[in-house]
Image (cartoon, rainbow, N blue to C red):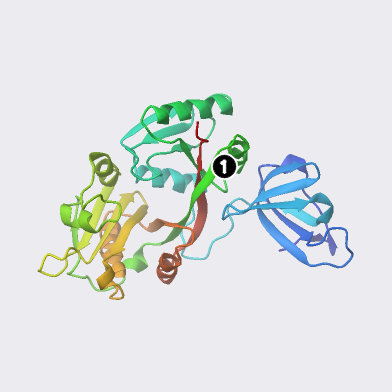
């Protein structure tokens, strides 16, 4: 990380860079001649009262005293990615992911989209802010709260660390609280299907009762209509099932994939507890990837909860890397 010009450390950022992605080097103990350097990269969300606030990619907020800063610069919003990993802006992938998990009901508020699906998943029951809400933020936030209250739902806004850092700060200042942190990961699609076809995996266009019996979000083995609307929605949706034993023990594994142009989005990759360790998750993803490749897709994405190390380890092996982080802000009660 190069901060120097002619061998000297330089601070090349000011308060006018709020909202930009920056890299800052600071001393761990401000004012001391000897100390350890710490490098912080993220969105500069504020610079007031001699304190910089930087939001890292994973959503963590770091405060740095101005006097402890020894170097700083702005850096590109989209860092270079490893060869073979698909490149995309945060906005592109957020938009694609939203199309692949559509709500049962939606309404526009400027460049915001209010989404509802009877409470089935936060993604389908939250505001997607892709720009200006068409007026002052307080009025837009209050409108969202009323819209969700009319549907018996709490108001939530989905925010990304990279694109929504200022909105995140402003809503938190109004009492909204952060919850449900997640990562979007991307990878090349073709390598997922680079194996012999697996006849155990059955593909269909509908999430049948057998598929739903393993899906952890199903209630009593069934799915309400709003959930089916979400699951079936998207440009081209595939469901994968690995049937279980003939004794009616339920499926061994399931998965879902939505194809949207060059993108294939994976979700609901689940394996029955008694069948884990057999490579069924990879088999499901391989057959879904094969179907997506046949429709012209070349890149893959998926979403995992932050802290789900088992899922991260699996997808690491399949070539996925982190693209961006997001979480939800929930409106204060009352």
Q: Residue 312: give x, y in percent of width and height.
A: 44, 66
In the rendered image, which residue does mark 1 sit on?
164
**x 46%, y 67%: residue:** 309
Q: In this view of the protein, which residue sits in the foreground, 162 or 143?
A: 143
Q: Residue 225: give x, y in percent of width and height.
A: 23, 40
Q: Residue 2: give x, y in percent of width and height.
A: 74, 62
Q: In this view of the protein, which residue sits in the foreground, 323 or 313?
A: 313
Tell me, yes or no, if residue 239 can be seen here: yes
Please identify the residue farthest to the bottom as the structure is shown. 278
Please identify the residue farthest to the front as the structure is shown. 334
**x 36%, y 42%: residue:** 99
Number of numbered discs on residues: 1
Instruction: Say which element carries label 1.
Output: loop
Q: Is residue 190 left or right of residue 86?
A: left
The vertical placement of 215 against 334, above or below, is below
Q: In this view of the protein, which residue sits in the foreground, 300 or 202?
A: 202
Q: Is residue 302 left or right of residue 291?
A: right
Q: Residue 236: give x, y in percent of width and height.
A: 27, 48
Question: Which quadrant of the figure contains the N terminus?
Answer: bottom right
Tell me, yes or no, if residue 89 can be seen here: no
**Which quarter of the picture shows residue 46?**
top right
Q: Around disc 1, counting alpha carbons within 10 Å, would you say few (fewer than 14), some (14 to 19), or many (20 or more)?
A: some
**x 61%, y 53%: residue:** 60
The vertical placement of 303 against 273, above or below, is above
**Which quarter of the picture shows residue 300?**
bottom left
The vertical placement of 271 against 116, above or below, is below
């Amino acid at each position: 990380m190069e901060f120097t010009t002619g061998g000297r450390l330089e601070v090349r950022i000011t308060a006018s860079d709020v909202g930009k992605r920056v890299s800052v080097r600071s001393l761990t103990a401000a004012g001391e001649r000897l100390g350890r350097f710490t490098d912080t990269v993220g969105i500069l969300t504020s610079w007031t009262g001699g304190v910089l606030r930087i939001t890292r990619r994973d959503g963590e907020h770091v405060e740095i005293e101005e006097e402890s800063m020894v170097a700083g610069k702005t850096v590109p919003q989209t860092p270079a990615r490893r060869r073979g990993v698909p490149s995309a802006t945060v906005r592109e992938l957020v938009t694609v992911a939203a199309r692949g998990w559509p709500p049962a009901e939606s309404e526009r508020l400027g460049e915001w989209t209010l989404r509802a699906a009877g409470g089935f998943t936060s993604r389908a029951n939250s505001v997607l802010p892709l720009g200006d809400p068409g007026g002052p933020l307080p009025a837009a936030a209050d409108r969202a709260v009323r819209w969700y209250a009319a549907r018996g739902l709490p108001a939530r806004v989905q925010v990304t660390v990279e694109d929504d850092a200022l909105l995140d700060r402003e809503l938190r200042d109004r009492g909204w609280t952060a919850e449900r942190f997640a990562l979007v990961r991307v990878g090349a699609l073709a390598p997922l299907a680079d194996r012999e076809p697996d006849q155990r995996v059955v593909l269909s266009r509908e999430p049948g009762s057998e598929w739903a019996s393993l899906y952890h979000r199903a209630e009593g083995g069934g799915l309400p209509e709003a959930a089916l609307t979400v699951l079936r929605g998207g440009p081209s949706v595939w469901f994968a099932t690995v049937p279980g034993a003939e004794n009616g023990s339920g499926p061994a594994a399931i998965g879902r994939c939505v194809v949207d142009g060059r993108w294939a989005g994976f979700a609901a990759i689940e394996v029955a507890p008694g069948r884990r360790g057999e490579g069924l998750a990879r088999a499901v993803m391989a057959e879904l990837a094969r179907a997506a490749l046949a429709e012209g897709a070349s890149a893959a994405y998926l979403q995992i909860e932050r802290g789900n190390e088992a899922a991260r380890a699996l997808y690491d092996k399949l070539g996925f890397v982190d693209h961006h982080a997001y979480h939800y802000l929930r409106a204060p009660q009352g």
